[in-house]
Amino acid sequence: MSDISIRVVGAAGRITLTRPKALNAVTYPMVTAIAAALKTWESDSAVTRVIIDAEGEKAFSAGGDIAELYETGKRGDYAFGQTFWRDEYRMNAALRSYSKPIVSFLQGFTMGGGMGVGCHGSHRIVGATSQIAMPECGIGLVPDVGGSMILANAPGASGAYLGLTGARLNAADAIYAGFADTYISDDKWPALIEALEAGAELGALSAASSTAPEGQLGAHQAEIDAVFGAASLPDLVARLEASDTAFAAFALKAVTRNSPLAMAATLTMMQQLKGCRDIRDALKLEYRFTSRAMEHGDFLEGIRAAIIDKDRSPRWKHSIAQLDPQMIDAMLAPLDGAELTFS
């Protein structure tokens, strides 16, 4: 498969995303290929660890490939999107619960679906170029691929801040928020990968680590908690509007740009998932929203404005002030006979 390289090298099962011109966007065949490889290697005693990386300097993966999702959704075919998300989420769960170490090397952009591939393993490596984000609210989705669980367990209300604004995290901030574990200078990665393929102990990662350049998230934690700890989206926006700080101005601009329905649902998810340690619970909740997002949410309009027409002027179905709380409940309600399962 030209979009992904899956092979065994020495002691390592190797997964390399090979779509650098498309910023390694994750397609449905890539999802199924990763899932199949993980299943095969789990029972292969010769494979003692899995290493995931990607070609190109700009991105580990900037997200999921949403072109086919948009095309099918516009035709009124919601089944493909539901199948894509269902199988992607099962793959995310398999990564999180894998019985063998998984080491991922996350250069450049790691966002959305790319985060779901790279940020659930046991050893998540970031470097100087790393930028991690969950910008789904900007296209009418909620933070998914298990990202809702990571966000909900981030310090204080920083998960709500990151989920609603889509703010990008450098290496230090990614570690602070729980998306990564270790900072290693990018120039050391090739030799480390070769050593791990040859069977080197995973302690080699710690030995090669250093302190990441300073982040910003912790410095704003008190202000984040004061604003993004709000119980509702209108209250949160009112708190931002009442603040005169540069940080609040940045956050307000982001929040007023994104889908009100997606942001309100994200805020509810952050509250429900606080303390959640089982990714399957988070993925089930995410799937309730995403499986409805084309027909009942803002997903298709979000993609049109951001990717298709690129006018950056989405016409959301709801305003922040007039969003009915019952709509949020409906988007996150159980799916009768269609709940996400992990058989």
Image (spheres, helix red, strand yellow):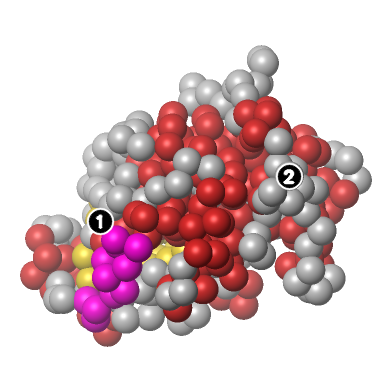
Above or below, 50 relative to 197: above
Report the front residue among 64 and 131. Answer: 131
Report the front residue among 297 and 188. Answer: 297
Work out how far the residue at label 2 is from the one at label 1, CA to CA, in angstroms.
43 Å
Q: In this rendering, which labeled residue sits more in front, label 2 or label 1?
A: 2
| Of callouts 2 and 1, the N-terminal one | 1
Report the front residue among 328 and 308. Answer: 328
Above or below, 85 relative to 200: above
Report the front residue among 280 and 168. Answer: 168
Amino acid under label 1? Answer: His
Q: Residue at x 76, y 48 (%)?
A: 318
Instruction: Tell me, yes or no, if residue 7 can be seen here.
Output: no
Side (left or right) of 192 relative to 42: left
In the rendering, which numbered label is found on residue 12? none
What span is colored magenta in the figure?
Answer: 212-223
* Residue with the most extreme front position: 242
Q: Which residue is drawn at 27% across and 37% down?
A: 99
Q: Which residue is drawn at 71% across and 42% down?
A: 323
Residue 255 image position (x, y, % from top left): 59, 61
Whether label 2 touches label 1, CB < 8 Å: no
* Residue with the most extreme bottom position: 187
- Mark 1 sits on what residue? 123
Asked whether 21 falls inside the magenta stretch, the response is no
Above or below, 281 relative to 123: above
- Mark 2 sits on what residue? 322
Q: Which residue is drawn at 53% across and 32% down?
A: 285
Amino acid under label 2? Answer: Gln
Residue 50 image position (x, y, % from top left): 31, 52
Above or below, 88 relative to 161: above
Q: Is mark 1 on a helix, strand or loop?
A: strand
